[in-house]
Image (cartoon, rainbow, N blue to C red):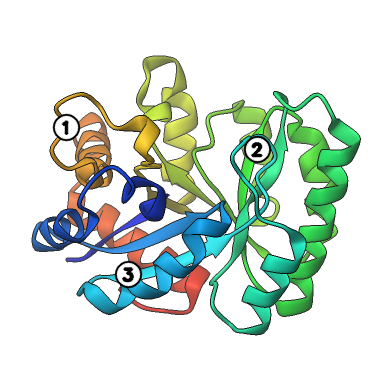
Amino acid sequence: MKLCDAHCHLANLAEVMPLKTLVEEAAELGITHFLSSALRKSELEYYTELTDVTDSKVLYSAGIHPFFEACDLEYADLEELCQRNLIWAIGEIGLDRGNPEYAVMEKIFVRQLDLAMDYRLPVVLHIVGHQQQAFDILRSYPLKFLIHGYAGSLQAFNTFTRLDSYFTISERVLKEDKHDLLKAMLKSRRFLFESDITQYYVKEGEANPLLRAQAVLDEVAELYNIDPAILISIQAANYQALTGYSL
């Protein structure tokens, strides 16, 4: 069965590693699809080229990140991508407690949500802190949301499930103090698996960091004695619900 890495940064990784070879190896091992995120102008053309040179399906989103200094995308860039029907979602966007300029951050967040509404696109969310504020904003938007790498409180998770939301399971929720959250994610059946790989997260000596999504799935399966095929099947259904494409 096919597996999707539901959140990664392939163009960013390609600056330091031979991505074509890595993607082909991942595909041979069953990781055939990627939901990748563009956060810089230099990455946009890359994704168009990438889909032409690999056998794997790569969909990409683009957004103005709330707390990534190198992000230089502007609203006009996103608007053009929407007009040309090039992105599957807006994102990753959101709120981050590391950004001291909350009012500015919120204004940019809301403007991008409005754009997603205009084009009826899903939204990939980055929520670190400000969970209640994020929910209060998002509840006004009848959109599909993919909350990536969520590792906040269980209470806030339960609140976000009131939206049409999905969650990526990452290494962050494999820690022992996050097992209650992980159990809730699994119970919700609204999950996908991610690597969140960028060039900044590659470990020393790591030959192919794209294989991390499979490693996360395998660890979840072992922790809770779940058949990996069941997890893959659930993710496939969620991938189709979010993107409109099948694995």
Indicate the secondary structure of the residue bearing disc 1.
loop
Q: Quadrant of the C terminus?
A: bottom left
In front of the other: 28 or 21: 21
**Residue 152 — which label?**
none
Residue 175 is situated, as x and y percent measured from the top left of the image, at: 37, 20
Q: Is residue 167 rendered to the left or right of residue 6?
A: right
Which residue position holds label 3?
Answer: 50
Tag 2: Cα neighbours inside 10 Å, few (<14), some, or many (≥20)? many
The residue at 77%/68% (across/down) is 115
Image depth: mark 1 or mark 2 in front: 1
For marks 2 and 3, give the CA distance.
28 Å
Residue 159 percent coordinates (x, y): 70, 41
Left or right of residue 191, residue 129 in this image: right
Observer-side mark, 1 or 3, equals 3
Q: Who's the residue at 82% across and 65% down the image?
A: 114
Looking at the image, residue 60 sits to the left or right of residue 63; the answer is: left
Amino acid type, callout 1: Glu
Q: Secondary structure at mark 3?
A: helix
Q: Which residue is denoted by mark 1 in the rendering?
A: 206
Point out the residue furthest to the right here. Answer: 103
- Say left or right for 203 vs 237: left
Q: Decide: is 133 above or below 48.
A: above
The residue at 62%/74% (across/down) is: 81
What secondary structure is found at the residue carrying circle 2? strand
Disc number for residue 127: 2
Number of the front mark, 2 or 3: 3
Q: Residue at x 88, y 48 (%)?
A: 107
Disc 1 to disc 3, how far (Cα)?
A: 22 Å
- CB of mark 1 within 8 Å of CB of mark 2? no
